[in-house]
Amino acid sequence: MNRRKITVAVSGLNNIDSPGPGIPVIRALKESTEFDVRIIGLSYETLEPGLYMHDLVDKSYSIPLPSSGMDSLLVRLEYIHSREKLDVIIPNFDAELHSFIKLGPILKSSYNIATFMPDLETFESRHKSVLYEFGEKNEVKVPKAKMIYSPAEIGAIGQELGYPLVVKGKYYDASIAATPEQAVNYFHKIANKWGLPIILQEFVSGNEVNVTAIGDGNGNCIGAVPMRKLYITDKGKAWAGISLLDEELIKIANRVIANSKWRGGCELEFIKSKEGEYYLLEMNPRFPAWVYLAVGCGQNHPEALVKLALGEDVKPYETYESGKLFVRYSFDQIVSLQEYEKISTLGEL
């Protein structure tokens, strides 16, 4: 079968100890049975490893940080599109999605560049700060949480939620505090890195299980694969995991996507309590860094997203293989100084 040639831009190339989803998404697209994909990497830092993975990334461009605003991002994307004729863009960082969602209609109407993301209201509805309300609306249990802007608020909220409690950043990072003093320390540490607000969340004891999923925006779950972490780094990231056969978890994922009419890829993070109940900890609005496990289990979620972005009908996946493991590894890439200088000075590689 002749595969259709398309050009897809992908961000999230920081395949480090806290990896971005970009490289796994690219690997999935390179294994597409329907598309012959030329990959354009979008990077924020000159040492993102994906820049130099030339077997996966055909060409790379630097783009402005999310804090630079939409206008500068649009100007940069216009330039990249003039050179590469982009068909689809898949952004993979939480912090950049707000800008890409707002730019989505402009990219489509003015340049015929497709994206496939939730609308702004749906995107905002699953933020950590309002996750409890999201859970009530979508019939899933969520630990109680409070959003704070000052460590002075920790005392009263700590008494209400009890210890240990979880201290979270708005986008990234989470630490378990056993005492008020620890909570204050984590507050400052996370705030200095990611800014305010900080979320204090009730701690639920149990096993962490995650689901990578994709919704079509009309309430249909196109695919869902659950995973249990087997090896966790000191940053809480899965370095190894195994796909699970868990019908209850799939039902919950389908219900959340159906009720919210989620559009695009996502990751649902749960705790399965000792009593066997599932609590939603986070709903990340993009594919997780372990999304390639879904491909290994028979569901190519990034390929499905590209088809949906192009307006094509996609039938939901009905099965996946359980008992499949992913084991992450690191290796040293050898990069010439000339390449590093080129991306640093010209913003292209």
Image (spheres, grey):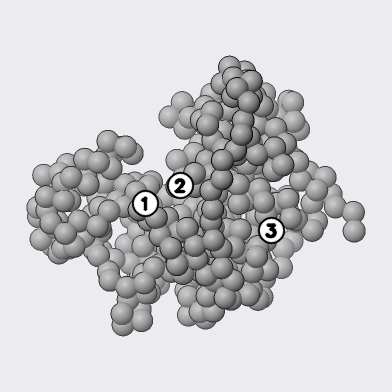
Precedes in sequence: disc 1 or disc 3: 1
Mark sitting earlier along the chain (1/2) = 2
Query: For residue 177, which quarter of the picture?
Result: bottom left
Residue under the image location 73 percent in, 50 percent down: 30
Residue neighbourhood size for the residue with mark 1, other residues' Cα within 10 Å, grouped as few (<14), some (14–19), many (≥20): few
What residue do we see at 31% from left, 82% from top? 275
Of tags 1 and 3, which is closer to the observer? 1
The CA span between labels 1 and 3 is 30 Å
Point out which mark residue 246 bears: none
Position of residue 244 relative to residue 69, above or below, is below
Tell me the quadrant of the picture where the C terminus can be found: top right
The amino acid beneath tag 2 is Asp
Crowdedness near tag 2: few (<14), some (14–19) or many (≥20) residues, C-alpha within 10 Å: some
Instruction: Give the amino acid type for the residue marked by disc 1 in the picture.
Output: Lys
Which residue ends up furthest to the top in the rendered image? 345
For the image shown, how many numbered marks are present on the structure?
3
Say what secondary structure mark 1 lies in. Answer: loop
Is residue 261 something that shows in the picture?
Answer: no
Percent of width and height locating residue 220: 60, 67
Which residue position holds label 1?
Answer: 235
Q: CA distance from mark 1 to mark 2?
A: 8 Å
- Please name the residue shown 11% across and 53% down the image: 180
Residue 304, label in figure: 3
Residue designated by label 2? 17
Give the amino acid at mark 3.
Ala
- Mark 3 and 2 residues: CB-CB less than 8 Å, in contact? no
Q: CA distance from mark 3 to mark 2?
A: 27 Å
User: Decide: marks 1, 2 in contact (CB < 8 A)?
Assistant: yes
* Vertical position of residue 138 compared to residue 106: above or below: below
Residue mark closest to the camera, 3 vs 2: 2
Neighbour class for label 3 at 10 Å: few (<14), some, many (≥20)? many
